Image: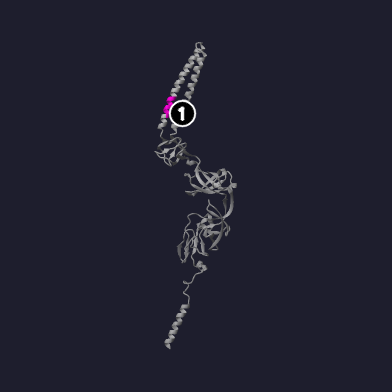
Amino acid sequence: MLRLSLIALVTASLLAGCGKPGGGDQQAATPADAAASAPSLLVSSEDVQTLGISEYASGPVITGSIQPERRADLRAELQAIVLQVYKENGERVKRGDLLVRLDDTAIRDSVQSADEAARAAGQSFEQAERQYQRLKTLQAQGMSSIQAMEDAEIRRNNAQSDLVGARARVATARQQQQRTEVRAPFDGVVSDRKVSPGDSAQLGKELIKVMDPGSMRFEGLVSADRMSELKLGQTVFFRVNGYPQIDFQGKVRRIAQAANANTRQVEVLVDFAGQQQPGVAGLYAEGRVQTTSVSALMASDGALVREGDKAFVWRIDGGKIVKTPVQLGARDDRQGLYVVTGGLKQGDRILRNPTSTLINGQRVELGKGASTGLGATKGAPAAAATTGNAAVPALPMASAASAQ
């Protein structure tokens, strides 16, 4: 009986132990419990953005490329062999510098022949002139007939015509010889070398291109749907591929009166405002023509957390951070800000660059000057998360790893 009683007691004890929960560490924590157990975030002024009303430049989008206003595409004006190319791509040139030399052997012979013909025509004209003057003097003394003087005058006039024609042929031959030397039409740089020594230059063949890097302009296209908003002198804010950290500004100089035949867009010519401009032609540029200025609530791109088609921000509310859905409008490419159309109000404080480790409802402690928002001082001390008596460094821009 005693043995059976012991067996029953042990069995009851095991059954009771199996029915008990495994402890707090084995239970699934609720979001509220996770937020309560998470360490507090200590954020500094540069981690927080206080939302306010900002000016948003609204207008049609303009896309295009940077092109020089002064550019020359130098082509062959005669058929010849390329003897030498004196400049390479990127080299600076002065007006009149020799760039390409073509073979002028045949043309030199033409020049010599034209010179000799002009010399002979000049001698014939001088002889005919002297003969005419002699007969004119004799006729005045009655020693020569009028017919003889008129014949001498005709020979003088014909010789003069032959001389003019010979001189014209000399000028043409020399002009052809000059065309074998391709020279820079203005100060600039060589942008595209098309030939090398030994190439056969046909009439009209591209030889070399020269551009003036100081005459850059933005040649853009605007959708025809927005052309009614364009006016001369409007400000254009745009960025150029290759210069990501620079915001360029310009003024509309010209609006085309005919749409592009392929894209059905309107060409707009924009001059750079100020001394700063890219020195490389052909770069892609995109911006916006400022036609109107709208006041709106703006949030920075880095503060937004995207989940599919939805967007959220981490808002500071009563000492806690709250994951708040927002509705967004247009984006200001120049400032990198989005128009907030719903979900937030003026004066709300949000984290600038949140991370995925934040927990909805997690406690937050504002460091000194954190309420200043956009007026934060650059280079503020890094934020830290505190748990108990130990300080745990936070991730950059108001982020701390949640306790596991």
User: Based on the displayed image, in which of its 4 quarters is residue 343 positioned?
Assistant: bottom right
Does residue 224 show up? yes
x, y percent for residue 394: 46, 61
Relative to residue 214, is residue 162 depicted above or below? Answer: above
Q: Which residue is mark 1?
A: 171
x, y percent for residue 113: 42, 27
Q: Residue at x 50, y 18 (%)?
A: 153
Q: How many marks?
A: 1
Looking at the picture, the colour scheme in use is: one colour
Label 1 crowd bin: few (<14), some (14–19), many (20+), radius 10 Å: some
From the viewer's side, name the closer residue of 183 and 361: 183
Does residue 187 show up? no
Determine if the magenta segment contains residue 114: yes
Q: Residue at x 46, y 26 (%)?
A: 167
Q: Residue at x 46, y 28 (%)?
A: 171
Residue range corresponding to the magenta coloring: 110-117
Which quarter of the image is occupied by the N terminus?
bottom left
User: Based on the displayed image, in which of its 4 quarters is residue 3 positioned?
Assistant: bottom left
Question: Label 1's element?
Answer: helix
Q: Main secondary structure of the magenta part?
A: helix
From the viewer's side, name the closer residue of 288 and 48: 288
Relative to residue 161, is residue 385 depicted above or below? Answer: below
Determine if the magenta segment contains residue 41: no
User: Based on the displayed image, in which of its 4 quarters is residue 101 positioned?
Assistant: top left
x, y percent for residue 60: 57, 49
Q: What amino acid is at disc 1?
A: Ala
Relative to residue 399, is residue 85 depicted above or below? Answer: above
x, y percent for residue 59: 57, 49
The residue lying furthest to the top in this view is 142
